[in-house]
Structure formats: C-alpha cells, structure tokens
Image (tube, rainbow, N blue to C red):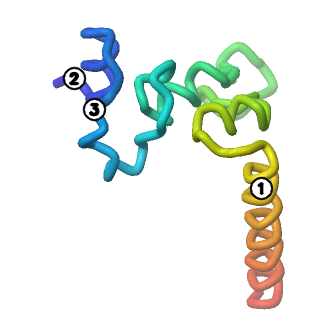
C-alpha cells in the first residue's frame, strides 16, 4: 500500500488542505505539503555500511536545512525558527540535567 506522500508524488499534487490535522502537513506545495518530503530533500543520507570502522549497519539521515529553508517550508520567519530551536535546546538541556541527577 502506498503512503500518502507516495500517492501525492505519483499524481504530482500536494496533500489537500483537508489533511491539515495530519502532524506531517506543512504549507509547502513544493514539498507536497509534507514534512517527510522536506526532510528527505534537505538531508544527507550517510550510509554506515560503507564505513569499515562503523558498528552501525544502517543509514543515518543528517538534516542540512537552513533556517531560511525551514521558515519557507513552514510559512514562518527565520526568527521564529531560531526561537523554536533555542527553546528546544533549553528543554533538552533541562532533561539532560534531570537524567544525570537521577543516576
């Protein structure tokens, strides 16, 4: 069975606005209104199987999107993206501190 992104790509149409309740929906026709497509188009896939010293046997997706690309895809300003990133980092730091204290 095809995923909704695969169907959109097959018919070359963006995900309809009726699907805005989908957690992957973004206001970007260029990316079929799907964050999955945005991530795939703006990421580098590292294949760990080609690295003899790597113990991992799968691929990693390394996001390379700029704040401008993210802001364009989400329909928000670069400053808003920066604020989201900063708040997320603060939350992550707090969680990491809690984990260290809990050990």
Instruction: Please tell me which of labels 2 and 1 falls first in the chain.
Output: 2
Placement of the N terminus among the 4 image quadrants: top left
Residue at 30% in and 38% down? 17
Whole-percent x and y of residue 87? Answer: 77, 67
Q: Earlier in the sequence, mark 2 or mark 3?
A: 2
Which residue appears at 60% of the width and 28% of the height? 57
- Badge 3 marks a residue whose secondary structure is loop
Label of residue 85 in the image: 1
Q: State the mark number for residue 16.
A: 3
What percent of the width, then of the height, locates residue 53? Answer: 81, 25
Q: Between 49 and 36, which is closer to the camera in this rendering?
A: 36
Which residue sits at x=50%, y=19%?
30
What distance separates the C-alpha of mark 2 from that of mark 3?
16 Å
- The x, y position of residue 60, in whole percent, is 64, 31
Pinpoint residue 79: horizontal percent, then vertical percent: 81, 50
Q: CA distance from mark 1 to mark 3?
A: 28 Å
């Amino acid at each position: 069975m095809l995923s909704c992104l695969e169907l959109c790509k097959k018919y070359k149409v963006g995900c309809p606005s009726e699907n805005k309740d989908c957690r992957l929906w973004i206001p970007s026709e260029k990316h079929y209104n799907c964050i999955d497509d945005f991530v795939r188009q703006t990421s580098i896939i590292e294949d760990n199987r080609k690295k003899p010293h790597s113990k991992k046997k799968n691929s990693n997706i390394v996001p390379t999107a700029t704040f401008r690309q993210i802001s364009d895809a989400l329909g928000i300003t670069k400053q808003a993206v920066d604020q989201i990133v900063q708040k997320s980092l603060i939350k992550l730091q707090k969680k990491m501190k809690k984990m260290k204290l809990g050990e």
